[in-house]
Image (cartoon, grey):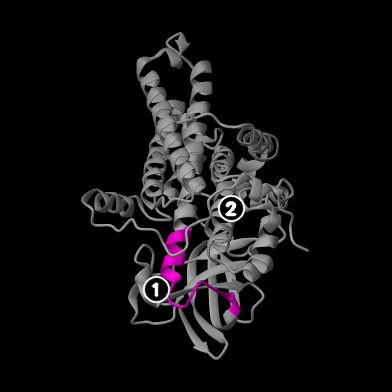
Amino acid sequence: MDFALNEEHLAAQKMVRDFAAKEVIPVIGEWDRKQQMNPAFLPRMAELGILGISIPVRYGGQGFDYITLGLVCEELERADTTLRVVMSVHLGLNSLSLLQWGTEEQKQRFLVPQARGEKYAAFCLTEPGVGSDVINMHSTARRVGDKYILNGEKMWISLATKAHHFLVVAKTDPEGGHRGMTAFVVTSDMPGVTSGDIHGKLGVRAGSTGWVKMENVEVPIENRLGEEGEGFKVAMGSLDNGRYTVAAGATGLIRACLEDSIKYAQVRITGGKPISEHQLVKQKIAYMQQWYDAAQLLYLRAGWLKNQGLRNTRETSMCKWYATDQSVQAALEAVQIHGAYGFSDEYPVERYLRNSKGAVIYEGTSEIHQLMQADYAFGFRDDRPLRCELPAYDAEAWQADTVPA
């Protein structure tokens, strides 16, 4: 088993690390206080190719593998969670779902502009009264001839007011349970689609989070992703990809807490010596290092499985659960090390703490992942492949092809 990163991994990692250090970290505190998204971030990420980093070149992407995607998410969230959230919804939940489930025509129409960063994308599953219990969603899609009429409201949608394309899951058979859901690509310019931002969030304040409402929206049948009744499978496959990006990002947040705490502990003097020499501070640093190392190994394993085209629901669930839980603990310890300064926005650790809390809630709460892992351990949960697995990574095919005219 080879744990070494190759030259492409290291190059992408350095590119994103440099971008974050020069263009994000110096200004992100200001945008967090404004509770606004820096309008330069999305175009700049598109310009650097980040928004299509792990999409084949023939579909407008950069052709890097899924491990690169994890490394990119780690670097982005080391700077701020809001940028990793962009990757989770635009690339993880939406673009990779199009790569996995889309027809060639859908890939050309939706995936290519998304991978190029010409269009932004979001994922619409959660509703005002429906979270982890997606089977109880209220959004409906009624087929009329060669189109569907969509009605419903989606809540806590990242990039709700920025996205051009939404991957929406709605019920086509209210009595069909898991088999009664269908997935669609809905565009923001369709009549009846409205959206708005949510303000007053605890964390991820420099990002865009909102709601999307659909009132008698006419969606052509060619915008259906997968077959009718496969919406639940599409959504679960999407979550495998989104959770992977969340786990990798949370690993970056642990690293941010660790690096900033080490830096502070070496200059803060108490009792005539740096607090880095106090045993209890050392203990906190040691735990953070342990959490970071373990979280990174877990997401790299999931990324390797994705590269092989293998089912990774259990492994991705495990790394998402572990990394997000430990990111909260790392942020708590970082605030404690910074003392009173950790309680103010003079240092970024208070932002790390606020941001960390969201990831233990979205894309499956920590409690949901605990239940999943227990069901796998008992053999209660089915681990057979979906009808359509995420394509295995093939460097030659992904990087050598050109974008079709």
Q: Residue furthest front?
A: 396
Q: Nearer the viewer, residue 339 or 2?
A: 2
Q: Quadrant of the N terminus?
A: top left
Vertical arrangement, residue 135 with respect to residue 282, above or below: below
Vertical arrangement, residue 399 with respect to residue 188, above or below: above
**Amino acid found under the numbered disc labelled 1:** Met
Dots 1, 2 in contact, CB < 8 A: no
Magenta run includes residue 228: yes
The numbered dot on residue 137 is 1
The earlier-in-sequence mark between 1 and 2 is 2
- How packed is label 1: few (under 14 Cα within 10 Å), some, or many (20 or more)? many
Q: Residue furthest bottom?
A: 145
Q: Secondary structure at mark 1?
A: loop
Q: Residue furthest top?
A: 272
Q: Nearer the viewer, residue 202 or 341?
A: 202
- Residue 144 seen in the figure: yes
Magenta run includes residue 112: no
**Amino acid found under the numbered disc labelled 2:** Val
Q: Residue at x 67, y 56 (%)?
A: 115
Mark 2 — residue? Answer: 86
Q: Residue furthest left?
A: 378
Q: Quadrant of residue 29?
A: top right
**Whole-percent x and y of residue 93?**
52, 58
> Residues in magenta?
222-238
**Whole-percent x and y of residue 379?**
23, 53
- How packed is label 2: few (under 14 Cα within 10 Å), some, or many (20 or more)? many
**Whole-percent x and y of residue 326?**
39, 38
Q: Quadrant of the C terminus?
A: bottom right
